[in-house]
Amino acid sequence: MSPDGPDTRPPASLRARLTRAGFVDTERAQRLLADRDLVGLLGEVGDGLIDLLGRAASPDEALLAATRLAAVAEPYRARVRELLTTAGDAQRRLVAVLGASGALADHLVRHPVDLDVLEAPSPIGADPAVVRAEMLTAVGADPGAAAPVAELPGAEGTDAMRRAYRRRLLAIAAADLVSDEPLSLLPAVGSALADLAAAALEAGLAVARADLPDHGAGARLAVLGMGKTGGRELNYVSDVDVIYVAEPAGGVAEDEALAVAAKLATGMARACSAPSGEPALWPVDAALRPEGKQGPLVRTVASHLAYYERWAKTWEFQALLKARVVAGDREAGRAYTEAISPLVWRAVEREHFVEDSQAMRRRVEEHVPPSEADRQLKLGQGGLRDVEFTVQLLQLVHGRSDESIRSPHTLSALQALSAGGYVGRDHAARLAVCYRLLRVLEHRIQLSRLRRTHLMPSTEADLRRLARSAGMSSAAEVSERWRSVRREVRHLHEELFYRPLLPATASLSSEEASLSPEAAKARLQAIGYRDPAGALRHIQALTEGVSRRAAIQRQLLPVLLGWFADGADSDAGLLAFRRLSDELGSTHWYLKLLRDSGVAAQRLAHVLSTSRYVADAIARSPESVRWLDEDAELAPRDAGRLWAEVDKVLTRQHDADEAATLLRAVRRRELARTSVAQVLGRTDVVAAAGAMTAAAEVALAGALRIVEYEAEHSDDGLLTRMAIIAMGRFGGREMAYGSDADVLFVHDPLPGADEPRAQAQATALATRIRALLGQVGEEPSLEVDADLRPEGRNGPLVRSLGSYAEYYQRWSSPWESQALLRGRAVAGDPGLRERFEALVDPLRYPAGGADAAVVREVRRLKARMEAERLPRGLDPSRHLKLGRGGLSDVEWTVQLLQLQHGHHVPELRTTETLPALAAAAQAGLLSADDEEQLREAWLLASRLRDAIVLWTGRTTGRQLDVLPHERLALMGLARLLGYPPGSGSELEETYLRLGRRARAVVERVFYG
């Protein structure tokens, strides 16, 4: 009834009902529904059957199979009727099987007696011994016998064994297909299939014994399951990989015993895979044996051992990881596994083991036909092999010292690797879910025809059946899930499988990898630690206990110890690492980053053992460890990018002191970033100086904004415009780690403002800027030095633009013109900045060039500086700034050329040394050789000044400008500059040589 009365609409057509139920070929379905046997069995077929079959993965295939079952003989025909008409678990299992597996439907049609297994309890999780007994009983063998012999020999025994196998396989598939959680059930399904395969091999071996006159009594043959059989994670249809091992029995000669064992092995394989009345189960593949198909089919334990000790390749040990006795003589099999297992877990010590494993995975990918690459569940990128190779490599690298991760089962091993800290919990969980889904898809595809395949279907109908059998709704959904899982698996595989820690760990001996105190102390002494006992205390503090943190440290430290030793000061590196780990070890990301990153751990070891400055900087900014994982994070930040960040901070911050602290924090962070990049060779000295300059520029601009904001909100309001002019190395974009910010302050009173009051306010603002940036606190200060102003410290801190104009017109001296060559407006009012630079251009680039008097004065000042400012007793050739061929030599030479020729050579009008040097050479003012000598000397001196700070960790002191004599210091500086170990003397000789050559140029060009 409808709400308005009787429903008079015609009933939906049969075709429409079939379509709604999920049938694709409705024409065929209508014919099958009218089939005489089906109608005779069930009477008139109505919506009940259509809806029932509509639950199947393929309703069309389920209907076809039901029609065929309707024609079986009694009493099984009545059983079919009961199953199709009585709701319950048996009905669900029948429909699921008929719609998902044409091959199992064929089996039921041939053997309807097996319909009863659909009502039995789930066979998944059954005791392997029960399964073995069932299969042996099927061929008339005694499960309790030491070497069971079938009463049904030859084809009769083979077919009986295969029927029993198919019967239990049907029960497993039925329980699997109706599961609401197929991913959760997957491991148990794989184990049930592996146990069934092992039982079939045992029954096949019993049949093979029955075919021999003495039942093979002269040989004790053991069958080792390999691959997924050995790991108890088998597919529905797969080659069963085996290795045969045999020992003589009862005084039989070895050759004779091996011949008997080979007959048994051949007979067993024939029972499983040769043509017979019942379909074959699967190929039995012994190609993983020593020498492959070219080697003997069966060997003794001793023969196996001799081969693996001398001839085996890397991949063979990886294959042996899953070896498990599955049939035959258990004692012989146990002797084999006990002999081989130590070799498996020592295989990682073979030369290039990790690299060979990685190369093998790439070769597997390369052999996938291009036409199959996007459909390969197993071998292609993002497929099952990516997961399995990853897990196995991690097991083999770390398993020699940790027995808890030696499981042959992929998912169990992955869980153990996660529990041991070798794989992140998140990575392991994601990889496990992806692996389960790939395996479920593989199972469903194979079930369809019980054929060995690992290819995703390509047709819409097959994809739709696959989706429905795996609990998804459509072909589109299963295709998208497949693509998504492939991407994720590939990403995780590349992140874990190619970790730099793996080959580094593999290269260690078992004793070194274990971190046992005796072995660790001996190794520390051997690789150059000055205080092995102290280093051992650090190691023990980092690794003691059973926490996940300690477990990960136990993985990292054996490798890190070697990487620290590659640096200039291994002891300092380890101490810094301990301090950093104490600070960050409990965070969720620190140890995970070091373990999982492709570069972070090695980079951290390098910077901590090479630079005290970086060690201190990272300790103050522990989050900077994250930079080590991304080259982009180490790239210098220009002033524009930094200002965008600072602008947002200042907009939100209303407390001047806190805002200034944030400005200094940004500068401190950028100094740390620059230092890390410099130590790692990710930036050169010029770019590093530019980055440090940009950080100082932004700090000054931010401080100016703060004080102007304060003035605007004062009683007087803002009375004047301000600008800051960078001078010296600041103006030349050549700041170093310990550089002050040399500046000039200039102001210009606003229209109508009282000039004395404007001058007083400008002085107060400049003083406030210096105080905000120079105050002592949690963030390092930036000393703002205005001593280069007119009249130096005796002159006013700030002048108006007019005052500067008057002073420079009346009183300016040559040294001030030279100093102004570095003048560059960096903050404040844009118009004022432009007017100041226009004001000083005629002084620094005088028309007609500097006259003879100016040139003489500049030379006199340079000579006086060399005589008076060099520390007494110091070898002038070793002072990086004031010494012969040092920075001042090059810079004064360049600046004299700028004073002389800047007016008519526009390219010389730059505040930076190297561009001016290049412009002088381009203009013919220097020869190319002279330009090269000066440039190389300046660059090396600049690099050494930075390196001394990075090595010592100090940013102040007279020794920062002096090339040291101490061997250890020279070696440390050499390592920072990229020289190989032990190159301190070479660095020293190189600097002195370049200094002599540069000084010769200075004598000629500067002094004339």
Image: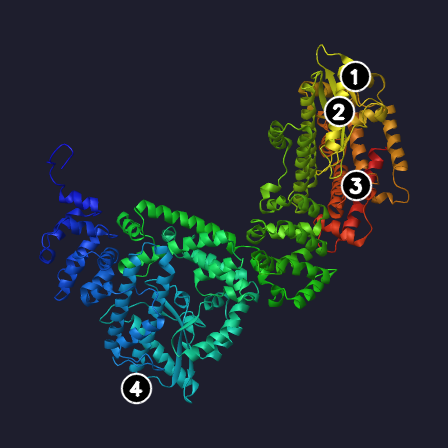
N-terminal of the two: label 3 or label 1? 1
For disc 4, the neighbor class at 10 Å (few under 14, some 14 to 19, many from 20) is few
* Quarter of the figure with the C terminus: top right
* 364 and 454: which is toward the camera: 454
- Closer to the observer: label 3 or label 1? 3
- Mark 2–mark 3 Cα distance, whole angstroms, equals 24 Å
Secondary structure of the residue carrying tag 3 is loop
The residue identified by callout 2 is 766
Q: Position of residue 297 (x, y in %)?
A: 40, 76
* Quarter of the figure with the N terminus: top left
N-terminal of the two: label 2 or label 1? 2
Type of the residue with mark 2: Ala
- Mark 4–mark 1 Cα distance, whole angstroms, equals 120 Å
Type of the residue with mark 4: Pro
Instruction: Note whether 928 is above or below 650 in the view shown.
Output: below
Q: Is residue 320 left or right of residue 859?
A: left
- Closer to the observer: label 3 or label 4? 3
Whether tag 2 and tag 1 are in contact, CB under 8 A, the answer is no
- Which label was assigned to residue 805? 1
- Which label was assigned to residue 956? 3
N-terminal of the two: label 2 or label 4? 4
- Closer to the observer: label 2 or label 1? 2
Q: Position of residue 19 (x, y in %)?
A: 19, 44
- Closer to the observer: label 2 or label 4? 2
Secondary structure of the residue carrying tag 2 is helix
- Which label was assigned to residue 213? 4
